[in-house]
Image (tube, helix red, strand yellow):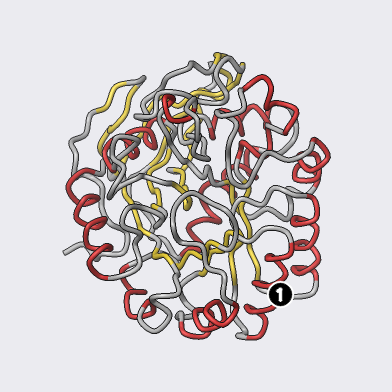
Amino acid sequence: MASVRLPGLVDVHVHLREPGATHKEDFESGTRAALAGGFTIVVAMPNTLPPLIDDDSLCQAEEAGAAKAVCDFGIHLGASSHNTATAYMLAERVVGLKFYLDATFGSLLLADLGDIREHFARWPKDRPILCHAEDRNLATVLLCAHLENRGVHIVHVCRQSEIECIRDAKMRGMSVTCEVAPHHLYLSHDDIHRIGPGRSEVRPRLQAPADVAALWDNMDVVDCIATDHAPHLLSEKDGSNPPPGFPGLETSLPLMLTAVHAGRLTLDDLIDKMAHQPRRIFGLPEQADTWIEVDVDAEWVVPEQGVTRCGWTPFAGMPVRGRVERVYLRGQNVFHDGFFHVEPGYGRNVRQPVS
């Protein structure tokens, strides 16, 4: 057994389903899954019910997080056609502004170029803009960011054409960062038959093996590994209209440690992409006396069910190496060998100063 101490991990892309769909997940169950996966900060996405686009909806999420979260958390605001003139006024309370420019779960699709440009122009430059921008929409947001002389972060990159476009933009001095989800590094459309057509529904969709290979070949371009933890119940995934999304908080670190053992990246690369870079890009605070202890050599098989409320994973049955043993948050042992030692409300909102 080789126990290694790592910094608390940061996931800037999770769906906690609160408000509006707490049968799938909520701030307590989602942040418990985060601790089990070694994450001490998670940032919740805004495509909830209602979507987080104004003061009232943001208050609902803030209050739920303050009452229930067991690890630290932040919240992203959603960009819509209805808040182009007001979103920037909420910037101090959130981590970033999220654009949905392609098919996704929820009602926040932003289609008008004028609205996109107005959000880019108004949003403070010291707060990130995150874009779900696939294929040609990626070129749109890179141009908008360039015209406003500001940075942009591209979420869940999954295609060879996308990672190569981002690589070339970086080489030309553009301020662009990006993240890749573990499921796009490990799964392709060749896995759909094994997983099942409903259970394999995800946005962006699983791509060709050549796209997966291109992501690994360009890991030096990837700034962050982010789970896009998107839980739905198994009954929903196996239904007639399966919603898109995979859970990912509990499997992300073991999958990436397995890649370390395979020589696909180094442990320092993993720490950089799962802790240091997310903090830097999103301006997240350091957490005093916070770390995780990981048995990097532990060999185990991913079970069907974990901590997350959704009760399934597309990685069930996969052998992995590396297991979280303990998590310390602000000096308190909050997770130890599968057991939690923390009460709801211990997690802090990273955008609200501690008195």
Query: For this view, does 27 lie left or right of residue 3?
Result: left
Residue placed farthest to the front in the image?
240
In this view of the protein, which residue sits in the foreground, 159 or 201? Answer: 201
Identify whether 326 is placed above or below 171: above
Point out residue 125 in the picture as x, y percentages from the top left corner: 50, 80
Residue holding disc 1: 174
In this view of the protein, which residue sits in the foreground, 50 or 186? Answer: 50
Identify whether 129 is placed above or below 207: below
Q: Amino acid at mark 1?
A: Met
Point out residue 165 in the picture as x, y percentages from the top left corner: 78, 62
Q: Quadrant of residue 232?
A: top left
Residue displayed at 63% across by 61% down: 133
Q: How many marks?
A: 1
Mark 1 nearby-residue class (10 Å; few <14, some 14–19, many ≥20): some
In this view of the protein, which residue sits in the foreground, 90 or 113? Answer: 113
Residue displayed at 41% across by 46% down: 15
Residue displayed at 48% across by 64% down: 98
Query: For this view, does 303 lie left or right of residue 85?
Result: right
Query: For this view, does 219 lie left or right of residue 182?
Result: right
Point out residue 149 in the picture as x, y percentages from the top left corner: 62, 84
Could you tell me which secondary element the residue under label 1 belongs to?
A: loop
